[in-house]
Image (tube, rainbow, N blue to C red):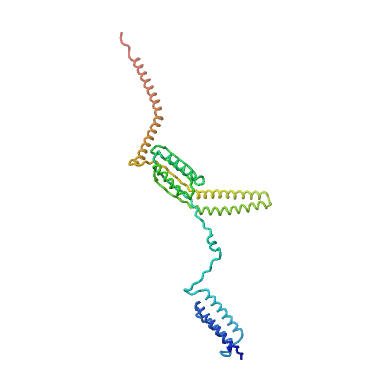
Amino acid sequence: MAAASPAGIDPSASAMTRRSMMARRLGRVSKRAGMGGKIGAGCVKSEYLHRRPSRYAVRSRGGGDDMRRGFCTAAMTVLLLGGCSKAPEGTTVAKEALPPGGAAAASAIKVSVPQIAYTFGYSYRVPSGEIAALQDRHIALCDRLGPAGCRVIGMQRESDDTASASGSLTLAVSAPAARAFGRALTAAAARSGGSEADSSIAAEDLSKQIVDTEARLRARQALADRLMELLRTRTGPVADLVAAERSVAAVQEEIDAARSWLAEARGRVAMSTVEVRYVAGDGGVFGPLRPTLATMGSFFGQSLALLLQLAVVVVPWAVLAGAIAYGVRRLRRRRRISDDARITPPPPA
């Protein structure tokens, strides 16, 4: 007989109570996991039968009980893990707070900015006598931005003070200020009595080419460093050293070409190209007729020039041929007169 506890409660009954409570908890957990609570209850019952063999049945205390207890322990562990891994629907799960500096680290991820080269085109219709003055105003606007903000690449001016006058201006403007600079060009043209005839924007994405060239440049630079290290530490035949030096020279040439292209591409991205075109175009009712009249006058002038060239080429030869023909005719006439004089007899005395 087992001795009673000081409180008069059977220790096995108290242990059974605790195991029943554990079974109910495991049953709730196993229901969440889809097991129906049968495994937990069965394991507790098996344990109870093992603890109290005299009341229910006589069981062997060999390896079967140890195996059963091991299976029950593993099943309970799986149920506990399954119940903890899946929360029921409608419950609120507290999110794990980011460690200090985590948000800053997440925001510090490098995002590649598109490398785009812009080309702006503007065409202005200006009175023929104002083309030169408007070009000078536009160049002055460029000079105000300084060499770092604007540079003149090219300028052309043709036949001023005529109906067919025209001109062009090419500038390199800092990309952030390119749009505002275009508005300033249009305002200057309006003050000169002109108007904007056409405008365009063209963009070329150089991001992929720049990234690829940078990666290739890093690889070539690493190769050049390794070759230089080999040259410094290697002692061998002269032919091998000469071959290594040639390899270093070839790699260095590729590195210089890649750096040159990168500098040019980054310059195109940093400085947008602005192309300005000036055409003569006065307003009024007869404004559209002026280009046609100018074209007619141009054709007439070209035809007259062609006739003059033809006259210069043909007239000298024509004069020479006429002189020869006149001489031959005159000679024949003299011969005819002399022949007639010999044939005709003298008159009788």
Image position of 6 with respect to 151: above or below: below
Q: Residue at x 62, y 50 (%)?
A: 248
- Which residue appears farthest toward the bottom when viewing the image? 1
Count of picture labels:
0
Q: Position of residue 107 (x, y in %)?
A: 52, 60
Q: Quadrant of residue 52?
A: bottom right
Residue under the image location 39 percent in, 30 percent down: 311
Quadrant, the C terminus: top left
Q: Image height check: is 347 above or below 213?
A: above
> What residue occupies the far front of the structure in this picture?
7
> Position of 274 compared to 101: left or right?
left
Instruction: State which quarter of the image contains the N terminus.
Output: bottom right
Along the viewing direction, whichever of 15 and 231 lies nearer the viewer:
15
x and y, in percent, of residue 296 in the image: 36, 37
Question: Residue shown at 53%/63% (left/top)?
Answer: 103
Q: Is residue 170 above or below residue 95?
A: above
Q: Relative to the observer, which residue lies in front, 281 or 145?
A: 145
Q: Furthest residue to the left?
A: 348
Q: Residue furthest right?
A: 235
As drawn, 257 above or below 56: above
**Which of these two is toward me, 22 or 291?**
22
List x then y, in percent, for residue 300: 36, 35
- Percent across and percent down for residue 297 are 36, 36
